[in-house]
Amino acid sequence: MTRNLSLFAGLALLFILTGMLQSWNLSLNILNLALLSAIMAIGVNIQWGYAGLFSTGIVGSVALGGLAVGLVSAPRVPEGWAAGGPRILGALIFGALAVALAIWIYRRLPKGRVRLLAVSLFLVVAFFIYRAILDPAVVAVEANNPAQAGHIGGLGLNSLLAWPVGALMAAGAAWIIGKIALGLREDYLAIATLGIAEIIVAVMRNEDWLDRGVKNLIDLPRPWPVPYEVNMQTHPDYVDFVTRAGFDAITFSTIFVKLLYAAMFGLVLLALIWLCERALNSPWGRMVRAIRDNEVSAAAMGKDVKWRHLQIFMIGSAVVGLAGAMMTSMEGQITPGSYLPLRFTFLIWVMVIVGGSGNNWGAVLGGMLIGWLYLAVEFLGPQMMEQITRGLPPGDLKSHLLDSAAHMRLLTLGVVLLVVLRFAPKGLIPEK
């Protein structure tokens, strides 16, 4: 316990030093992103640390969480919805019914070539009908003021409501993926989940009617009760109060907003830790870990291994989707091009490995530590390189070293991962 408290105290010191030596705005911005990274790390730890499921589709769950914010809280576009919204909805319902009917036909017919041909023919015909319904509606929606709209819009509700919706969307996608891929071996499961996650991101990039694609969906409303800095700075009572206290009105407003986000994210993180700790130390948690350690013996004891794997996969994806919705809600925009596997899959895995898989507190420590390091190296790298090359004469070598400072982030993360794997192979806070 003393060692763990020391690790978290050292982590807190990093954020304090960042605020003192750089700026408190920067420190709080890194803190908020680190809290979100810790929540994502908890989701991955549930899948890998609890059940041993190696998923590389984390970025897909993050993207679905962000999409939920756009669908729930984006301003309404009545013209876009009227142009083809009902028809798009009808096409999606038709597609879901067609898939369900194909599964029913597959189960009803006996094994053999007849079943394969019947299901294939049905799916081909259903696909062309689906596209015939969907395509004209999509063209009509995207033709409606494409420079500023070009999509169906959202419900215009508070962004807070999008957080659980993002979790549900990620869990629903995990159920579909799990039904398809969880029967595969670990390496094939990793390939399948990565491929499906890339499909999700590709759909978000190319379907403008859904989220404006690569044109990005901006100006999403903030969650209640977070105010806008401009509104605070123009409020006479606020300006009077801050001036009397001796603070700058602009700086204090930005710090106050970031503190409010940190409080909201911290409450969600604490609630998740409490729930995960209770679950891990319950009979359910012991059963899941028994399945992880030896599936054959757990199945011999009457445990439904496939169902538990699917359950864990959905819960972990829901937590990651929740974090994705929270991040989009804070940023106020959906940028499908930013959903990269390096940032939202492999970096999250590094957090879990460094912190300690199977331990909730280890996932939090790894998430916040690597989250700080990933963002801090962005400004520490050039500063360090300037000090290192101070004695070198001007020339190609010095210019090359200064230009390469931007790539020190990946080098630093790689070195940290290697050091932790060498001296703490089970992580900084290993599983008990």
Image (tube, rainbow, N blue to C red):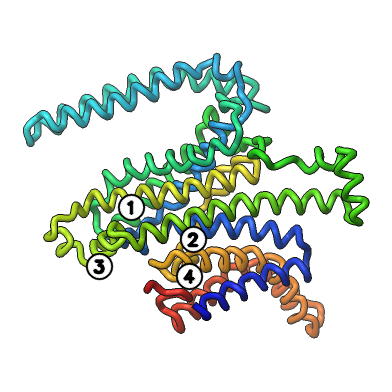
Amino acid type at image mark 4: Gly
Image coords of residue 320 (percent x, y): 47, 50
Q: Amino acid at mark 1?
A: Ile
Residue sitting at x 57%, y 49%: 338
Quadrant in the picture for residue 234:
top right
Q: Which residue is mark 1?
A: 312
Residue occupied by mark 3: 293
Q: Earlier in the sequence, mark 1 or mark 2?
A: 1
Q: Earlier in the sequence, mark 1 or mark 4?
A: 1
Query: Does 402 appear above or below 215?
Result: below
Q: How many marks?
A: 4
Closer-to-camera residue (428/199)? 428
Disc 2 to disc 3, C-alpha distance = 23 Å
User: For the residue labelled by badge 1, is the local secondary structure a helix, a strand or a loop?
Assistant: helix
| Drawn side of residue 346 relative to residue 54, left or right | right
Which numbered dot is residue 348? Answer: 2
Q: Amino acid at mark 3?
A: Asp
Locate the C terminus and report the quarter of the image it occupies.
bottom left
In the displayed structure, 288 sits above or below 395; it is above
Q: Is residue 162 visible?
A: yes
In percent of width and height, residue 207 lies at: 50, 32
Name the element at disc 2: helix
Residue density around tag 3, few if under 14, some if 14–19, many if 20 or more, within 10 Å: some
- Type of amino acid under label 2: Ile
Residue at the spot of label 4: 355
